[in-house]
Image (cartoon, rainbow, N blue to C red):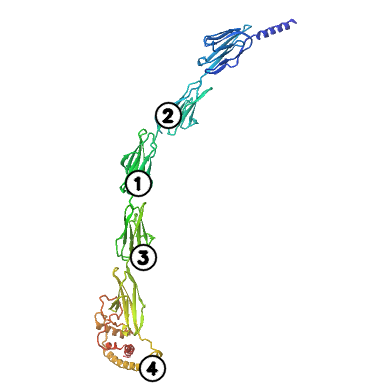
């Protein structure tokens, strides 16, 4: 029993000693990456001391060694180096053909063997990338382009940029699975330039900028003028220039109001006239995109305004009856008209109005307040001119007045002047009547010395020969005895003599009047007024006197001239004309007696 533990211990020691002699190979890197042309080091560490070994690649010996004896395979003599102490291998100037698995076999000095496999990857640096497109002539908005980036190298990756900004997938840009392609639908003239970066784990390269060949346009043409001041006057020279963004350059055609003029970028209008006014169109055409675009510019050619005139349809308009139309015209290009009355704007209404072009001004049912100076100003963008006309509205006569105003009491023996006036344009013709008798023509009628026979109705008639209207005014004039005062007039004796004479005359006249009245009272009748009969005028006067009138003789006219146009009057005494030599005719010769006889005659009639 005591011998068993010792035997067991000896077995364990033997096993441990045997296990410690087993050869294992530890590689520092099982995968080795080396740039093409570089050196590859296959570094290994055996677990025990080795006596020899070999390296093989692709079934061919690279190197083999035993102790210090080393033998290199064909093609490796100058490139390979083995470290016999640990079996590591250095391979110089590797190339792409050196890539692959390298197998190491080693034998320990105790006779155990081991092997290991290491992989060499020779990396090729990326070349300068190149960008190509599937289409070289692209039409904006219509075409889609696919760009491809290609480069040589090991495990190349790609990155796209537009104007130095990284393109992120999405939107209008689409990237392929390995990012080597870039697709752009509906290309725009603003797309690009594009660059591509190719890279791997050991290097990177950037392509040259790639520009898309995009055809576009034409855009909306732009028309400029020289000179650039609008509008233009007749006789000037105008140059029109057209430009449009387009690739390729667009063809440009000119039109005036739709009619073809010429082809070219510039259109020169020499000695331009009003007939050249209109819409000038520049039409651009791109023969690749097969698209048209056009712009239009209105050119206005003006003739300076001159010879402005204002005429009218009626030279002598009558108030209320007539309508006046003022017509404004001028030579040159008329763009605007403006009317003024007495330098003030005209307020239009249903009576005063103009058409839309203000070529005329209509004044319906003219009023006297429409009288004034009417001015028409004609203008365009270049200059202006004006003309004026005076319009006089004829009216009246109306508002007839007299100075002094009636009724008038005039002192016997004193002068009397009646002045007549009226509102009338043109000035009226003035005619004075006493009853139906024409006295004189003129605004004034003067009686040098008033007598009792001057009492009566004096009518002023005013006539307007344009309006054909008449108006009149009747003034009642009464002759009166001037007041006499002893201190400054006749002596007491003179006054007494006059009184006695008057009393005697009254007695005589009274007796004669009473006798005549008694004889005729029974057959006296009031006759109808007949302005054509002088005796009828006398009887009419007497009949009126009998009826109680206190003005029997005051309306007798001094002047017996008849008038072709008597005024329209209704006065009882307007038609009296006394030519006979009766008692009453004699009475006219004694003014002072008549004044007193009138009262006496009335008393006698009452007694009878």
- How far apart marks 3 and 2 lie (CA) works out to 84 Å
Callout 3 secondary element? helix
Quarter assignment of residue 8 = top right
**Image quarter hosting the N terminus:** top right
Indicate which disc residue 369 carries.
3
Mark 2 element type: strand
Q: Comparing marks 3 and 1, which lies closer to the viewer? A: 1
Q: CA distance from mark 1 to mark 2?
A: 45 Å
Which label lies toward us, 3 or 4? 4
Real-space Cα separation, disc 3 to disc 1, in angstroms: 45 Å
Return the disc, 2 or 4, that comes first in the chain's sequence.
2
Of the residues under marks 1 and 2, which one precedes in the sequence? 2
Question: Label 3, label 4: how many angstroms apart (C-alpha)?
Answer: 65 Å
Residue at 37% from the left image edge and 91% from the top image edge: 490
The earlier-in-sequence mark between 3 and 4 is 3
Instruction: Assign a secondary structure to mark 1.
Output: strand
Image coords of residue 455 (percent x, y): 32, 82
Residue at image point 26% right, 82% down: 577
**Which of the marked residues, 3 or 1, is nearer the chain's N terminus?**
1
- Callout 3: few (<14), some (14-19), or many (20+) C-alpha neighbours within 10 Å? few
Instruction: From the image, state whether disc 1 or disc 2 is nearer to you.
Output: 1
**What residue is shown with label 4?**
492
Q: Is residue 84 above or below residue 200?
A: above
Helix, strand or loop under label 4: helix
Determine whether, in the image, residue 168 is placed left or right of residue 430.
right
Q: How far from the left and from the top, in percent, is residue 217?
A: 39, 36
Q: Badge 1: how crowded within 10 Å, few (<14), some, or many (20+)? A: some
Dot label at residue 299? 1
């Amino acid at each position: 029993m005591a011998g068993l533990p010792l035997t067991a211990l000896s077995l364990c020691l033997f096993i441990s000693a045997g296990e410690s002699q087993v050869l294992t190979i530890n590689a520092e890197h099982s995968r080795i990456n080396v740039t093409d042309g570089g050196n590859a080091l296959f570094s290994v560490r055996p677990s025990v001391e080795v006596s020899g070994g070999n390296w093989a690649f692709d079934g061919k010996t690279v190197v083999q060694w035993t102790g210090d004896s080393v033998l290199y395979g064909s093609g490796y003599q100058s490139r390979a180096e083995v470290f016999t102490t640990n079996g590591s291998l250095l391979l110089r100037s590797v190339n792409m053909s050196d890539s692959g698995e390298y197998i190491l076999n080693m034998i320990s000095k105790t006779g155990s063997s081991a092997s290991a496999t290491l992989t060499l990857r020779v990396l090729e640096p990326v070349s300068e990338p190149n960008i190509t497109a599937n289409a070289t002539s692209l039409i904006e908005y219509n075409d889609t382009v696919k760009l491809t980036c290609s480069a040589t190298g090991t495990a190349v990756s790609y990155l796209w940029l537009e104007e130095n900004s990284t393109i992120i997938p999405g939107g209008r840009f689409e990237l392929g699975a390995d990012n080597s392609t870039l697709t752009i639908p509906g290309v725009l003239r603003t797309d690009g330039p594009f660059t591509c970066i190719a890279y791997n784990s050991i290097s990177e390269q950037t392509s040259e900028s790639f520009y898309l060949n995009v055809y576009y346009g034409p855009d909306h043409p732009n028309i400029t003028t020289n000179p650039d001041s609008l509008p233009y006057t007749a006789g000037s020279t105008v140059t029109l220039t057209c430009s449009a963004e387009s690739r390729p350059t667009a063809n440009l055609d000119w039109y005036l109001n739709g009619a073809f003029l010429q082809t070219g970028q510039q259109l020169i209008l020499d000695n331009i006239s009003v007939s050249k006014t209109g819409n000038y169109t520049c039409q651009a055409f791109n023969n690749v995109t097969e698209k048209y675009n056009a712009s239009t510019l209105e050119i206005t050619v003006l003739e300076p305004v001159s010879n402005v005139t204002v005429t009218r349809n009626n030279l002598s308009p009558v108030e209320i009856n007539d309508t006046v139309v003022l017509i404004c015209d001028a030579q040159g290009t008329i763009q605007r008209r403006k009317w003024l009355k007495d330098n003030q704007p005209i307020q239009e209404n249903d009576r005063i109005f103009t058409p839309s072009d203000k070529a005329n001004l209509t004044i319906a049912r003219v009023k006297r307040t429409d009288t004034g100076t009417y001015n028409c100003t004609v203008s365009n963008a270049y200059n202006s001119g004006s003309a004026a006309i005076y319009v006089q509205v004829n009216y009246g006569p109306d508002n007839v007045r007299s100075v002094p105003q009636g009724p008038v009491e005039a002192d016997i023996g004193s002068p009397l002047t009646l002045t007549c006036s009226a509102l009338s344009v043109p000035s009226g013709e003035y005619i004075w009547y006493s009853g139906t008798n024409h006295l004189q023509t003129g605004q004034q009628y003067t009686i040098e010395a008033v007598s009792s026979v001057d009492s009566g109705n004096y009518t002023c008639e005013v006539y307007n020969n344009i309006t054909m209207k008449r108006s009149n005014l009747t003034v009642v004039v009464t002759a009166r005895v001037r007041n006499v005062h002893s201190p400054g007039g006749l002596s007491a004796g003179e006054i007494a003599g006059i009184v006695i004479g008057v009393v005697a005359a009254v007695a005589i006249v009274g007796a004669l009047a009473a006798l005549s009245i008694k004889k005729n009272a029974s057959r006296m009748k009031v006759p109808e007024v007949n302005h054509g009969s002088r005796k009828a005028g006398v009887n009419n006067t007497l009949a009126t006197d009998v009826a109680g009138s206190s003005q029997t003789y005051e309306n007798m006219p001094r002047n017996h001239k008849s008038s072709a146009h008597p005024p329209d009057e209704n006065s009882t005494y307007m038609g009296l004309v006394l030519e006979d030599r009766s008692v009453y005719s004699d009475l006219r010769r004694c003014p002072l007696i008549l004044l007193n006889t009138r009262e006496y005659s009335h008393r006698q009639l009452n007694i009878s």
